[in-house]
Amino acid sequence: MLSNLSANTSELHIFQDKSLDFCAIICLQQYGRGPALGGCRMLSYASMDVAVQEAIRLAKAMSYKAALSELPHDGGKAVIMRSANNIDRHAVLKRFAECVNSLNGKYITTIDSGTSQADMSTLKKHTSFVTGYLAGDNTENDPSISTALGIFKGMQAAVKLTYGHDNLAELPIAIQGVGNVGYHLAKLLYQAGAQLTICDINQSRALQCAAECAATVVAPSAIYAVPCVIFSPCALGQILNSLTVPQLKARIIAGAANDQLSSPDQADALAARGILYVPDYLINAGGLIHLSLQQKTPQYIPREIARIAQRIFTLAEEAKLQQKTLFAMAEAMAEVRLSANSKTNCEK
């Protein structure tokens, strides 16, 4: 089923298969930049509407991420609604691959919350429109490593904007979620000498990370109130809201989670408290950069990830001149670039 969200720019595709208790949503934001590249989530949702709204929000964020990173992609995101009856994961993934194929190359899928490189390898057997899969025993194809590196570089930039230096040694940093990206980020920060406090809904995973990174573990509900310089959301989205923002004791928010703000107003609430919020789609672009470049120009991946820090500096300087928040400036720049693509596409 297809419905237009807005003329010539957005598509919402909903696929259902009652025999598998299968439901997948794919949202595409089309501006003529190139095929949409975005992850596939496989999570439990309270309702179809909740899943649809998340796919729409995340597809928009992917559009912003690609535009700010100057990548030849539109934004897209897929959601598979996980069900207790989805006991045959291979069958579910095969059915999803058929959904991806039906879009004829407009969407390229990859890893996201609830999916893995192994899942992408399964999809690879049934569709060519997938990336981030296992390449033998080679972990270099794992985009989460590049995402973590981009967050690390972005943190250095944010610290320099706030304190005039980019040294993370002995800096107290709180990480919310130490899954794929959060774990790699914790390792980088530990090597840089940061003092880490972490949490994860998977306690054994948190304890393993703590042992490897000399980190303190707190309950997930306690992470917001941890005194720190940087609070790094690396789990699910919409965690910055009217209940959590007042608890924060950080100077900077810089993390990997997508869709961190429950509403744009929370960016103003953070600014009012003197907290520098680095927009997720600006700082967490390392994985998208990795996946976009790995097939054609992999040698440029480290260079492009390093440019995340420079983009933060540039946008922060412009935000200061225009008396805007970094969030507002990044959003405005992304919209300008996407609008330029839409206009060029209409003129052809």
Image: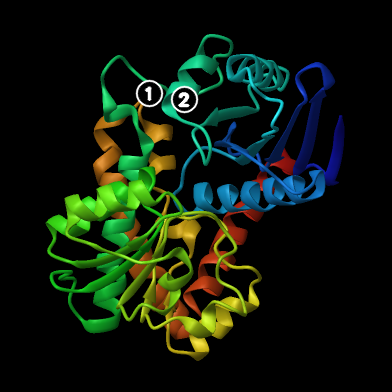
List x then y, in percent, for residue 39.
Answer: 55, 37
| Disc assigned to residue 131 | 2
Q: Quadrant of the N terminus?
A: top right
Residue at 13% x, 60% y is 192
Considering the numbered disc 1 on the image, is that residue within a helix, a strand or a loop? loop
Marks 2 & 1, CB-CB < 8 Å contact: yes
| Disc assigned to residue 295 | 1
Is 9 positioned to the left or the right of 326 in the image?
right
> Distance of mark 2 from mark 1, alpha carbons?
9 Å
| Quadrant in which residue 264 is drawn | bottom right
Residue at 81% x, 48% y is 49
Which colour scheme appears in the figure? rainbow
Query: Is residue 340 visible to the viewer in this orientation of the structure?
Result: yes
| Above or below for 276 versus 82 | below
Query: Is residue 324 visible to the viewer in this orientation of the structure?
Result: no
Is 27 positioned to the left or the right of 299 in the image?
right
Mark 2, other Cα within 10 Å: few <14 / some 14–19 / many ≥20:
many
Viewer-nearest of discs 2 and 1 = 2
Is 97 positioned to the left or the right of 150 in the image?
right
Amino acid tagged 1: Gln
Q: Nearer the viewer, residue 319 or 152?
A: 152
List x then y, in percent, for residue 196.
Answer: 24, 66
Amino acid tagged 2: Thr
List x then y, in percent, for residue 84.
Answer: 69, 31
List x then y, in percent, for residue 257.
Answer: 48, 55
| Quadrant in which residue 256 is drawn | bottom left
Q: Nearer the viewer, residue 46 or 140?
A: 46
Mark 1, other Cα within 10 Å: few <14 / some 14–19 / many ≥20:
few
